[in-house]
Amino acid sequence: MLCLLRLRLFHKAALSFSSPFYRRYRRPFSSSKEMRGFKPPDSKSNKLGSSYGRGSVSAGNSSIYGERSVSPIVGPISKSAQNIGPQRQKISPDRSTSKNSAGSSGGDPEQKVFDICRKPSAVGVKLQKSLLEINREKRKEAQCSKGGPQHEYVRPGMVLLKKYISHDNQVMIVKKCRELGIGLGGFYRPGYGDGAKLRLQMMCLGKNWDPESRKYDDKRPTDGATPPRIPEEFTKIVEEALRASYDVIKQKNSKTIVEEELPWMSPDLCIVNFYNNDGRLGLHQDRDESEESLQKGLPVVSFSIGDSAEFLYGDVRDEDKAKRVLLESGDVLIFGGKSRWIFHGVPSINQNTAPKRLVEDSNLRPGRLNLTFRKY
């Protein structure tokens, strides 16, 4: 008899725990004290109380993440979640608004950080290359550099060194620029007082250049940040490239005094620009350096890394009359002396032309990284 009574009690308890009401409103308890104080909602109305819900935590008419969503959590909403406001809304790193795109004048200094490299997850799973594949790529790269045009005397005071920067140095430059670019004084989208924005991301090294005032300064006006110093590795490549350009000038005319045609320069400032696929820069002159630097014709040394781009140049500000040269990843363009005052610009970026090996080793996002070194 006692056994039958225990069996009936067990069966009754099993039915109560498997009921729809229990399955719907059950939740884990953090302590036995909380379990004793728990009061389930009214079973007659079959509705959740004001402290329970299946909807997302809202901030106004939108959720924390900018879109409505459904949370699987059933339980009381914490006070910290209730106090979340619109300032916590996440913004995609590839989208910008007028409030989040800082310019050199009137821009928001609290704009989002721009990263020239993609996250590893965006690149996908990268398989380890075999030594045979690595050596094959190096041989192919060496053959291309030997067979193709390495140096070009463009005009007096202007020299193009094709594929001059090695693969390893290109990866190093990308990583250094990425490290500096996400820090204080790093990349931002410059603009003007009327709200117009340049179609690129910019970072200054050594000294800050402001496109609105067209002046150099020791601090950036938008946030007061001090520009990072030029890495020594960059300066070394600049000086080596200048020596290589002297050899090109001597080959063109052995009687030329090379330093008169293209003066020597050790840079103390650099403007780093990153062009997205739709980036461009209109014809302009680099004439904001000191009067002494301009009168001497101290050269501008330009590094190109990533996607290739057309480079326009000419003596007048007219795209129809301008000449064109293709700048590819690893190219170094130098113009000084009589060519120091040329008008130049970048009308377009050639998409998906960056070397595959460079993208794999550096995670550089689609676009063109350009570094222009000068002496103030």
Image (cartoon, rainbow, N blue to C red):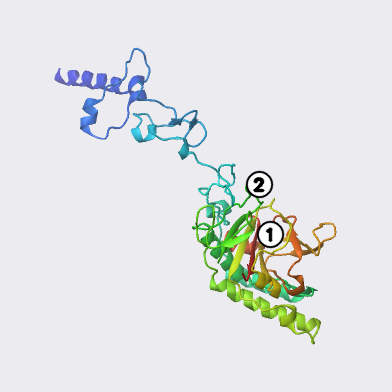
- Name the foreground residue: 231 vs 308: 231
Which of label 1 and label 2 is nearer to you? 2
Q: Is residue 242 left or right of residue 183?
A: right
x, y percent for residue 288: 66, 63
| Pointer 1 with pointer 2, Cβ within 8 A | no
Residues at marks 1 and 2, CA–CA distance in whole angstroms: 25 Å
Residue farthest toward the top in the current orientation of the protein:
44
x, y percent for residue 180: 52, 61
Residue 49 circle label: none
Amino acid bearing label 2: Ala
| Residue at figure coordinates x 53%, y 42% from the top left | 91
Residue farthest toward the front in the current orientation of the protein:
291
Mark 1 and mark 2 lie on one chain; the one further toward the N terminus is 2
Q: Is residue 136 visible?
A: no
| Residue at figure coordinates x 54%, y 60% from the top left | 178
| Residue at figure coordinates x 52%, y 60% from the top left | 219
Residue farthest toward the left in the current orientation of the protein:
2
At mark 1, the secondary structure is loop
Quarter of the image that includes the N terminus: top left
The residue at which mark 1 appears reads as 307
The residue at which mark 2 appears reads as 196
- Name the foreground residue: 141 vs 153: 153
Q: Residues within 10 Å of mark 1 (few under 14, many from 20)?
A: many
Q: Residues within 10 Å of mark 2 (few under 14, many from 20)?
A: few
x, y percent for residue 35: 24, 28
